[in-house]
């Protein structure tokens, strides 16, 4: 191996090592100021206590598909490195929360919820999803004495809507989308396919 090749390999190795180091630093560099309970209560859209009962990655079907009432009706989540945790909610202090509610967290400042543990959860609405992160006052419920003392007893969550209602809404959305695609295909066939067929028939 000549000196020039050796220098190039050394430079590549140094750059690669620095890149990994920067990536690790970015992942660990999540420092933030956590406000007192009542201040966090004003900042958050929802605050509740519940047990983490399920978790899945945002990115595998069907969790990476979201349905909307407005075009394009179906949307793919861009961040596939997020976790969606479902909670069995026991107490609500702020916001409209159902008995089973999901919260998304991820990235370098994501908060890791453990299955089977009870938490106090602070979250905000973003693109029709509840999201949270490590800089909010999320905590295991047994260690959240300061928050519980500040908020009082709270209220019970609302019952989840029937599953049939959710499926009907999604089926209507899919039907509308297929109708739009079918209409567009039919118009394209009339403009290009039918005209091309008539021209071929006339030539022959």
Image (cartoon, rainbow, N blue to C red):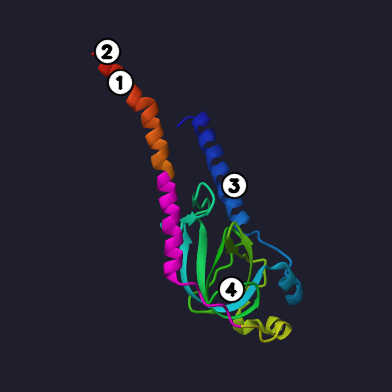
Q: Which is nearer the eye, 144 or 129?
A: 129
Q: Is residue 171 left or right of residue 17?
A: left
Quadrant showing the N terminus = top left
Q: Which numbered disc covers residue 97?
A: 4
- Residue 178 sits above or below residue 204 on the image: below
Of badges 3 and 1, the one in the foreground is 1
- Label 3 sits on a secondary structure element that is helix
Q: Position of residue 109 (x, y in %)?
A: 62, 61
Which image quadrant for residue 107? bottom right
Of badges 4 and 2, the one in the foreground is 2
Q: Which residue is mark 3?
A: 18
Secondary structure, magenta segment, majority class: helix
**Residue, x 69% and y 63% (percent of image)?**
31
Reading the chain from its start, which is encountered first: label 4 or label 1?
4
Q: Is residue 135 left or right of residue 117?
A: right
Q: Is residue 180 left or right of residue 139?
A: left
């Amino acid at each position: 191996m000549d000196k020039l090749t050796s220098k190039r390999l050394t430079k590549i190795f140094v750059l690669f090592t620095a890149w990994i180091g920067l990536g690790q630093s970015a992942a660990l560099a999540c420092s933030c100021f956590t406000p007192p309970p009542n201040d966090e209560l004003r900042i958050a859209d929802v605050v509740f206590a519940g047990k983490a009962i399920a978790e899945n990655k945002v990115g595998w079907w069907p969790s990476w598909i979201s349905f909307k009432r407005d075009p394009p009706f179906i949307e793919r989540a861009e961040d596939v490195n997020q976790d969606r945790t479902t909670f069995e909610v026991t107490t609500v202090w702020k916001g409209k929360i159902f008995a089973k509610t999901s919260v998304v967290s991820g990235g370098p400042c994501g908060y890791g919820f453990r299955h089977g543990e009870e938490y106090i959860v602070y979250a905000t609405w973003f693109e029709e999803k509840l999201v949270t992160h490590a800089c909010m006052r999320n905590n295991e419920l047994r260690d959240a004495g300061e928050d519980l003392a500040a908020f009082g007893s709270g209220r019970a969550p609302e019952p989840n809507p029937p599953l049939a209602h959710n499926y009907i809404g999604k089926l209507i959305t899919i039907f509308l989308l297929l109708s739009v695609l079918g209409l567009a295909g039919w118009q394209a066939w009339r403009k290009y396919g039918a005209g091309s067929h008539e021209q071929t028939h006339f030539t022959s």
